[in-house]
Image (tube, grey):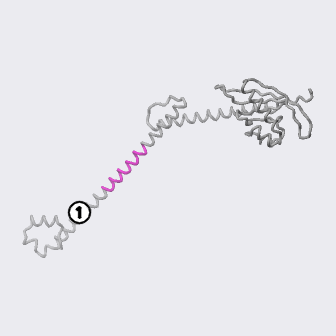
Amino acid sequence: MKLNKLLDKQLKKFLPEEYRNKEELQLFLNAVSDSYNAYERDIELSEHAFRMSEDEYREINSRLNKQIALKKASINKLKEAVTETGENSLTESNDEDELLHIAAYLKRQIGALRLTEKKLHDQKAFYEHILNHIPADIAIIDKHHRYLFVNPHAFRNPEIRAWIIGKTEEEYGIYRGKPMGFTVERRKHFDEAVLTKAQVEWEEKIVTPKGNTEYHLRVLYPVFDEHDELDIMVIYGVNITERK
């Protein structure tokens, strides 16, 4: 049996040759050689396991460092976004404290936003309630002639009232089969109100679906924004047939 290299080297150095070849020692030397081999295998396996653990540790550490860097970058982006909203109370602290501070701030902002939205909704409902109960035609259109609001007095049919939102005067004229002169006349007064930046009034002759002739006083009131550009046009109308 071939002996372990290290054991063979040691035997050649310390054990005389006549003893190495004795048959009665071979079993003992073979057993010692097997122990040497087993020990070396254990050492090799341990070193291999250590190298694998070290590689895994480096990989895990690299992933953790990337996650930490990503977390810091995310926190910095959040801080920048919060600062842009006017909040300057964020201070340098550890990441967990910063996240808690940002979360608390965002919670306050969401609460304030919801309260503002409710106030705006209530305010809008309040004014619409008033406009809906004024005994006159009330409509609001934007600078592109699209209807933004009409009250029930202007369009009594709820389906038409819902349909016309977002539509133009031209689209309404086509939908109702009105002559082209109807929309041309209204556009002329619209342009006049924008050009003069003043209220414009005129009388409009209308033939109802039943064939009756009515006269309506129309009033356009332009509203301009801070850049002196038209924002909305408020339209007011009242039936003056009885005055004729």
Residue 22 horizontal/vertical position (percent)? 10, 74
> Looking at the rendering, which quadrant does residue 197 occupy?
top right
Kind of residue indicated by mark 1? Glu
Question: What's the magenta region?
Answer: 51-68
Residue 244 horizontal/vertical position (percent)? 92, 27
Residue 186 horizontal/vertical position (percent)? 79, 32
Q: Nearer the viewer, residue 17 or 223?
A: 223
Q: Is residue 122 above or below residue 35?
A: above
> Looking at the rendering, which quadrant does residue 45 occupy?
bottom left
Q: Is residue 226 above or below residue 169?
A: above
Q: Which residue is mark 1?
A: 40
> Looking at the rendering, which quadrant does residue 163 occupy?
top right
Q: Is residue 44 left or right of residue 178?
A: left
| Callout 1 crowding tier (Cα within 10 Å): few <14, some 14–19, many ≥20 | few
Instruction: Tell me what residue is drawn at x 69 percent, y 30 percent.
Output: 231
Please identify the residue farthest to the bottom as the structure is shown. Answer: 23
Instruction: Tell me what residue is drawn at x 38 percent, y 48 percent.
Output: 62
Q: Nearer the viewer, residue 222 or 207?
A: 207
Quarter holding the N terminus? bottom left
Instruction: Tell me what residue is drawn at x 43 percent, y 45 percent.
Output: 67
In magenta segment, residue 60: yes
